[in-house]
Amino acid sequence: MGFRDAARDALDILRRSRGVREAVEGVVPSLQRPTVLNEGPQPEGVQGARDLMERLRDAQTSLVAAFDPQGKVGYGSLAKTSAFGELVRLAPALQRIRPEDLPTNADRNAFFINLYNVLAIHGVVAFAIRTSVMERPAFFSVATYRVGGVVLSLNQIENGLLRRNAGHPATKRPTLSADSPAHAFAPSRVDPRIHAALVCASASCPPIRFYDPEKLDAQLTLASENFVNADVRVDGSARPKGVIRLSAIFRYYAADWGGRPGIERFLLAHADEPLKSELAAAFRIGLPMVHDRYDWSLNGVR
């Protein structure tokens, strides 16, 4: 990420902050005080980790069903639903989850994708977000759940676990310390398709869905196809030869795909016609990639 891109991203974020205090908190890590959103009483009637995960799955499925077909969220009404109430009731039991309860990569990826998406929703409600999560630029560091005895922020779930402690796109620094017990929850490899599934409560995010470990490969492939076909285009109007326009996510996490060669393979593998042929022709002549500005507006409905 070049300096110009980084500066533009920072301005896009800071101009949405509620005030000076929130803006300073966003850039000074020592001022960030995580809010653990699942510190309530342990729910009654939960019989072990498997039962908990089945109950969470049912509540998450009901929650997703309450969204509109484009995955947009009516946060005000959602907070009053029984599905959201059940998730809040069950969330303290996440403290009982252990790495051995998630034995496979599919288990871990599906569990933490779903958890990330739910935590983002919970954070919007808990912090009374109105127009953008960047009203509080430290949102991704201060909205947290306690899972298996460790406190995990959205940043740590994404960059520490699902991306196996790859550097944060903005700072390039790992989000988990080398000796953090959270590493035990990480999958054994990074699947870049997670970026088509993680929903950060913003307009530029993909639509929210529920992910099932038994169906995860097909679900992530479908999510990737939807993401590519909705957000990627070849723009022949740009001079002199045109450009390939795509989501800023491909800039933030380019290393997860293996740089431009990996991104090209990913796009061709998931694009439908005629986009696939247009991309193949654009790659042959080396058209540059231009990334859209990330829209941090809340992915909510009015």
Image: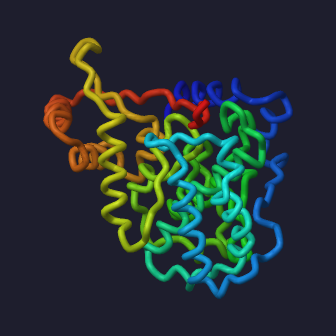
Which residue is at 14% across, 32% downward? 281
Which residue is at 32% across, 34% downward? 232
Instruction: Please say which color scheme the image uses.
Output: rainbow
Please, is residue 293 above or below residue 42 in the view? above
Q: Is any atom of residue 124 visible in this view?
A: yes
- Give the left or right position of residue 168, taking residue 229 as reference: right
Q: Nearer the viewer, residue 101 or 248?
A: 101
Q: Position of residue 108 (x, y in %)?
A: 50, 72
In which quarter of the view is residue 180 placed?
bottom right
Q: Nearer the viewer, residue 173 or 135?
A: 135
Q: Position of residue 112 (x, y in %)?
A: 55, 65
Please, is residue 41 above or below residue 162 in the view? below
- Give the left or right position of residue 57, taking residue 273 as reference: right
Q: Nearer the viewer, residue 302 or 246?
A: 302
- Give the left or right position of residue 129, taking residue 267 as reference: right
Q: Is any atom of residue 284 visible in this view?
A: no
Which residue is at 43% across, 63% downward? 190
- Image quarter in which the C terminus is found: top right
In which quarter of the view is residue 267 placed?
top left
Q: Nearer the viewer, residue 3 or 202?
A: 202
Q: How many marks?
A: 0
In which quarter of the view is residue 3 placed?
top right
Q: Position of residue 46 (x, y in %)?
A: 68, 82
Which residue is at 48% across, 71% downward? 187
Please, is residue 85 above or below residue 56 in the view? above
Q: Position of residue 86 (x, y in %)?
A: 68, 65
